[in-house]
Structure formats: structure tokens, C-alpha cells
Amino acid sequence: MKTETVQTLIIARTLFDKARELCSIENKFTASAGLVILQDALELFIYACLIELGADQEEDLENFKFNQLLGELKKRGKKVIKSGTLKALNRERVQVKHYGQVAEPTTVVNYFSAANSAIDTLINDVLGKSFQDIFLYDLLKDGESKEHLKRAVQLIEEEDYYEALVEIRKAIFVEIEEDFSVEGFEYRSMTSSFDLLSLTRGRKAPWPTKNKEWIEENVQDPFDFIRIDNEKLRIDLMEWGITTQDYWNLWRLTPNVFRFWNSKKWIYKHDHRYLVEAANEENAKYCLDSAINLILKKQSHFDLGRYLNLDEDYGIRAKLKVDSPLYKKASKD
């Protein structure tokens, strides 16, 4: 694929995932917002296909209206299914965006379903793959979690769905669950004084779990070292712009994993339930998409931070003409 095609598809996929979330909510205002985003995503998918077909080299596509884009695809031998419904979607979007009208949630759901089918068929026809196979992990920062997700993509292509789910859960462990691990506290007594360990490993785990007495009584296997503080997790997810259900869906649909702090060895459970129920293409792709979106939102949140450069000394130096005492704080008198 052309670089421009990939970039456009990534943007379209990002918008489409957001539209999926909004269009499924039974609130006419939220659904209407989802409809506007859905139409933007649909146009970008069509635009990406036209770029791949070389239409941008021959036509001034940025000035084309929606129906003209569909016509350009037809002229190049690419049929768009449900085109009548897509044109109706576009008209509804005009009413919402330009006139402040609201759309009915049930209608929006039908439009989303039609757009989903049309996009999938078109991308398959032009690119030879489903648009669900277009993943956003390239938007993630280089690092351990990204490598696990790249490995998951390879495993899905090889139809090894169980191992793909394991790699997805590893990425979630690295990004979230490791902060709730109390493994390092198995030799720390309940009566021990505060130490730096509490600020590093397991820093978000509930305080009563950070001692060897509690661990000896409650940890039956290494997976029990993960002690999620639901309130802290909920606040983190809200701050990152992630619904708690997105995390818990991943938690429920992927096998438990754990990495030991010193040896860095990974272990995971060969759970029969996941082999039978969860290890399939649909679930693996859903979990992959959800994990990428979750980590992307977390990284985007931290990217918003702005800091002063404190590496250099910007102190002001003054030479006193007369010796004078220097106080740490203002004198009371």
C-alpha cells in the first residue's frame, strides 16, 4: 500500500472506532454526534481507496462531494454496496451538522451497520484485506507494549488466537496491571517502616496488601500478586479518557499473565475456557483493537503534559555591597 493510503486509513479507522462507541448509545444527541463522525470516517475510507487506485493523480479529489467520490469509484470499476443507504446517511449528516437536527438512535445504528458492511467490502476489493485488519499500533510509541501488540497481529494472521490473546494481555499488564503487583512486598513485614519500595513496585495496590503477612494468607499463586484497587483504576481510566468497561472487557476476554520482577519471566494460565470460548478471530481482533485504543489514549494523556527545562541553572546571582545575613524564611519581627 502507498504511504498516503496507510496514513489516511489510520485516521479513518480512528474516527470509525469513535463513531462505533457513540452510535451504539441510545441517546439521540450522542448518536447524532456519532453519525457526523461516522460520515467523516466513511469519506476518508473512500478517499484512501481512491488514493490507492491513483485517482488523486488525475482528479482534484479534495473538491469532490460525497456522491462524486462514489461516482469516481464506480468509474474505476469498484462497486460500493448499499450506496443508496450511504447517500441517505450523508443527507442525514447534513441535517445534523449544518442545521442542528437530531437523528434517531435506531436509525443511526442502521446507518452504522450499512457503513460497516460497505467499508469492509470496499477495502477488501481494493486492498485485499478487511478494514478490521488495519491496526493502529503504528500510532503507539515504541516500547514493550507495542512489541507485544505487533506480535499479536502476527499471531492473528497465523490463526493462533490463544497466543495472540496472551500477547495482548501482556501489553495490558505492562501498561496497567504491573503497578498493582505486590510481589516485591512478600518479605516486608506489616510493621516495617515506610520505604521507597512503596513508591515504585505495586505503588497503586491497596496499602493493606503490601506486607508478607497478608501475602502469605491470601496469595495462592503468582497471579494473586495482582491486587487491583478499583477506585484508583477507575480514576486513572477516567483521566485517560477510557471507559472502565473497555478495561474490564479485556480483563475478562484474555488469559491471566504475570511477569516476575527479578527474572523477568512471563507465565500465563492455559485456561480451557479461553481455548474453547475466547480463542477465535472475532474476539482476538476485538481485544487487539481495544488494547491499542486504551494504550493510545493513555499515551496521549501524558503527551499533553508541559514542563519547564530544569536541566540548566537559571539562578540569578547578586553581589552584595555590604555583608548581610541570609535567612531561610521571613523573620517574624
Image (cartoon, rainbow, N blue to C red):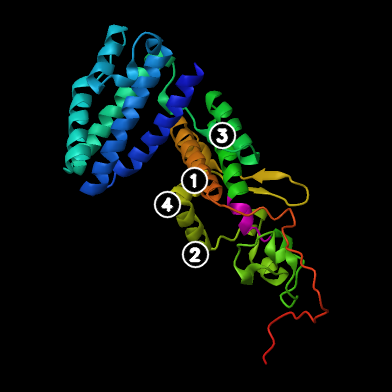
Direction from residue 225 to residue 19 in the image, left or right? left
First of labels 3, 1 by sequence position: 3
| Magenta-colored span | 176-182
Tag in front: 2 or 3: 2
Tag in front: 1 or 2: 1
**Disc 3 from disc 1: Cα separation:** 21 Å
Element marked by disc 2: helix
Query: Magenta includes 179?
Result: yes
First of labels 1, 2 by sequence position: 2
Kind of residue sitting beneath label 3: Ala
Element marked by disc 1: helix
Can you give x and y, in whole percent of width and height, for residue 10 in the image?
45, 29
Q: Nearer the viewer, residue 128 or 50?
A: 50
Up the image or down, 215 lies above or below 65; here it is below
Which residue is tagged 3? 164
First of labels 4, 1 by sequence position: 4
Task: Looking at this view, name the residue that lies furthest to the right.
Answer: 323
**Disc 2 from disc 4: Cα separation:** 13 Å
Q: Residue at x 52, y 63 (%)?
A: 232
Tag in front: 3 or 1: 1
Which residue is tagged 1? 297
Circle 3 crowding by C-alpha within 10 Å: few under 14, some 14–19, many from 20: many
Direction from residue 258 to residue 11 in the image, left or right? left
Tag in front: 3 or 4: 4
Direction from residue 144 to residue 33 in the image, left or right? left
Q: Residue at x 50, y 35 (%)?
A: 279
Which residue is tagged 2? 231
Can you give x and y, in whole percent of width and height, for residue 300 in the image?
52, 45
Q: Residue at x 57, y 28 (%)?
A: 155
* Residue 246 in view (yes/no): yes
**Disc 1 from disc 2: Cα separation:** 19 Å
Kind of residue sitting beneath label 1: Lys
